[in-house]
């Protein structure tokens, strides 16, 4: 039936792990193709409240994001970074180190 990002984030948020605090960057590896987009958006908002920053590493090439409603939706709620290739992933990691 697909990934349920909302459920996964809700479980993480409910645990309120000590490691999830304002000085932390939460990395989510997801193509943003999830069931229950609205639930996932609410859980993502809570994750952003608990963590200092949330980045979604998306394996779908960035040029295709504009065609996917879910990708556009999540990109409006969190920073989305392309990791479609190893070069993209390396670039994203360099940006994380700089930030």
Image (tube, grey):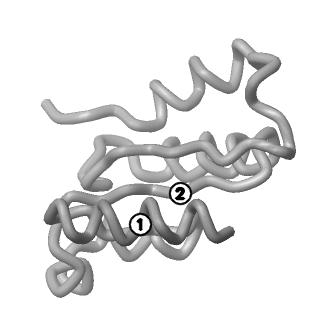
| Quarter where residue 19 is shown | top right
**Residue identifier under label 1:** 92
Residue under the point 47% across and 72% down: 75
Question: What element does badge 2 sit on?
Answer: strand
| Quarter where residue 20 is shown | top right
Residue under the point 34% across and 32% down: 4
Q: Nearer the viewer, residue 91 or 64?
A: 91
> Above or below — where is 8 with respect to 37?
above
Residue 82: horizontal and vertical position, in percent?
Answer: 30, 69
How many labels, in total?
2
Residue under the point 44% across and 60% down: 93
Image quarter (top left, top right, bottom left or bottom right) of the N terminus = top left
Residue 44: horizontal and vertical position, in percent?
Answer: 60, 47
The reply, left or right, for residue 4 in relation to residue 44 is left
Q: Residue lying farthest top?
A: 15
| Quarter where residue 77 is shown | bottom right
Label located before the other in sequence (1 or 2)? 2
The reply, left or right, for residue 2 in relation to residue 9 is left
Asked if the residues shown at circle 1 and circle 2 are in contact, with their CB atoms under 8 angstroms apart, the answer is yes
The reply, left or right, for residue 12 in relation to residue 5 is right
**Residue identifier under label 2:** 55
């Amino acid at each position: 039936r697909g990934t349920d990002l909302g459920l996964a984030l809700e479980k993480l948020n409910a645990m309120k792990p000590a490691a999830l605090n304002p000085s932390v960057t939460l990395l989510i590896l997801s193509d943003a193709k999830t069931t229950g987009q609205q639930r996932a958006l609410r859980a993502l908002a809570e994750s952003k409240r608990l963590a200092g920053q949330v980045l979604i590493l998306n394996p779908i090439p960035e040029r295709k994001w504009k065609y996917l409603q879910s990708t556009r939706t999540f990109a409006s709620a969190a920073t989305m970074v392309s990791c479609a290739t190893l070069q993209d992933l390396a670039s994203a990691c360099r940006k994380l180190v700089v930030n």
